[in-house]
Amino acid sequence: MTQELFDELLSNGENETVDFKEHSYFYNLLSNNKKDKDAELLKDIISFTNTVRDQSAYILIGVKEISGKGIPIGIDESEAIDNSIIQSKIKDKSSPVPKFSYYPFYNNEGKRFDIVEIPVAWYPSPCVSTVSIGNLLERNQVYIRRVSSNEKANYDEIIRIKAWLDALPKNINIKPAIGKSSVKSSAKTFEFDEETIQRLFGNEAAEDEDIDRLKEYYFKNDIFSKISVDLPLRILVGHKGIGKSALFKVAISEDSLKGKLPIIIKPDDVYNIANDSVEFLDLIRTWKEGLYNVIIKKVFAAFGIRKKIEFKYDDIQEELLSVIIEHLNLALDEGTLSSASQSILDKFLETPKIIVYIDDLDRGWLGGKSATNRISALLNSVRDISNTNKGIYFRISLRSDVYFLVRTSDESTDKIQSSVIWYRWSYHEILALLAKRVITFFGDEIDENSLKALHQGELSKYLNKIIEPVFAGEGRWENREMYKVLLSVIRKRPRDLVKLLTLAARNANSRGSNFILTKDLQAIFDEYSLDRIQDAINEYKSELPAIERLIFGMKPSKRSNKASDSFYYDTPSLLLKLNKLIERGDFKFSNGGIADAKQLAAFLYKINFITATKKQDDGFIDRKDFEINRYLAPKFEDFGYDWEVHMAYRWGLDPNVTKDVYSEIF
């Protein structure tokens, strides 16, 4: 114990890791008999030992609580008790035997206090009393510290304690975390209210996330460095919900810290650019002129400069950065900038670099020829600008389906192919991403490379503070590791995991719990699955207006009795099912084309509604989705693969096959 830690514990008041006692346990108070004193001591130490935490717990003797804070009174030397006596009172009355220490502490005023310190330690099971003492202590009962009192643990809490103990290394040695106790205490006593759920799992929309929390939990896979590298043009392609906007938001923050000038261009900034031109070359030129105006306007706004400059595009085609710098220097000479803006501008002018982020331009995407040409012309224009204007860098994000149509309809886009970065997540990375969010929520830090190096089973232990480690349901999922269940029902999109756990946490909260159990997931699988179906409809109806009829047409046949029959197809059976849907009415793409069965199959594959799957000789199941082998889709060549409906959609397609869904683990 140090004076600094002692003062901090006093200021934080009683909580799940701190208790105050005005007198020692065996102070001569007539109202207490010997058994009551033994029971109080034993119950306190057992409760603290079983409390899920990441730092030592303390009982401060000689402290009185007033108005939520500890007042240091001190104790007389006659109240002092030897550590060996306290240890002997616990040793024979509990199992496993709790580890703790009992020692004196003198503060700066010379007052004596006795300290009981209960460290974080591994045990094979929660600690319980082996004896009953009156009405104060029950034999074999698990007690925990709940806020500032000792209470019986309920079933959820016992499961959580076991998971926590299993996750601890046997030789763990946790030291006090001075300066973080208030943060950790608030985290440990959390409830699954809406604010906490969002802070824990993250905001579904990165642009609405608090930047400090985003940077705290953001997990960088290798895609981040490929986008933030100093190259003129980077095009980030990925499905909706995969994290493109989050990557841009973190990159923008880091660019600013490096003295670069990042500017973000949103759809509202360019809604009126290149909408009317017919000739493709006219579209490209219109985009260039429009982007020049937007860039200049946003650069000036970044430094608080309110002026509009007139320019002729033909005169500054290759001099954009020079023109901007010239006018920034004029602003400096005029002395109209604030001191803060002037300081930022001085740093920028040392090595001027403007990073232009263009995000979310596929919002409201219609999928027709005009929309495709407009995006294609944009890509051509930024390529030209970045090549002819040193110091101007472009970062563009596009949904995978949008880029696919542009890439396959315009041969000129082969020139930007080397600048395209496909945003992918592996299941291992998504699990590490979730682990980091949990770790940082509880006030801890961890190196990303350490997370990446861990086995998935080790990563999952970090989740044991918030979710049951083993699925307690039925079928092939029974007794499976929970992380495997979570990963099997999400598409490779972090947002899916956020939505899944948000729904489960809300259900846990409705039970009055801050710990997610199997029954919480089972209660929300239908809603989660229907949400994913609606996501797909919203994302792709601009390309195929009748997508809703197509997806719900993939409901299992009444003749199918097993989930594997309902959701698994070889190529002939898949095309047969799709042809039956076409018999009920044509499916027309936004570009006017009438879809045949193979085109519909290609579309379902492209949107990750179905996955290509092949069982290999060694029993391993090889799966390919659209990004991994994106050229499989156009002509729908199966290359020997069969097809399965992604797990995320199955409950939504037919809630009546719940038991069969549980019996199939993927």
Image: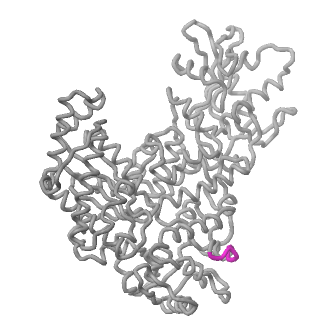
Question: Is residue 114 found left or right of 384 in the rendered image?
Answer: right
The quarter in which the C terminus is drawn is bottom right
Whole-percent x, y for residue 504 in the image: 64, 56
Whole-percent x, y for residue 67 in the image: 69, 19
Residue 619 part of the magenta-drawn span? no
Magenta span of residues: 653-658
Residue in front for this viewpoint, 414 or 101? 414
Answer yes or no: is residue 165 visible: no
Residue in front for this viewpoint, 10 or 371? 371
| Residue pictured at 59% horizontal, 82% vertical | 553
Question: Is residue 419 found left or right of 72 in the rendered image?
Answer: left
Question: Is residue 68 found left or right of 462 in the rendered image?
Answer: right
The answer to whether 543 is drawn above or below residue 336 in the figure is: below
Locate residue 235: give its quadrant.
bottom left
| Residue pictured at 54% horizontal, 50% vertical | 201
Name the chief secondary structure element in magenta. helix
| Residue pictured at 52% horizontal, 77% vertical | 547
The quarter in which the N terminus is drawn is top right
Whole-percent x, y for residue 621 in the image: 47, 77
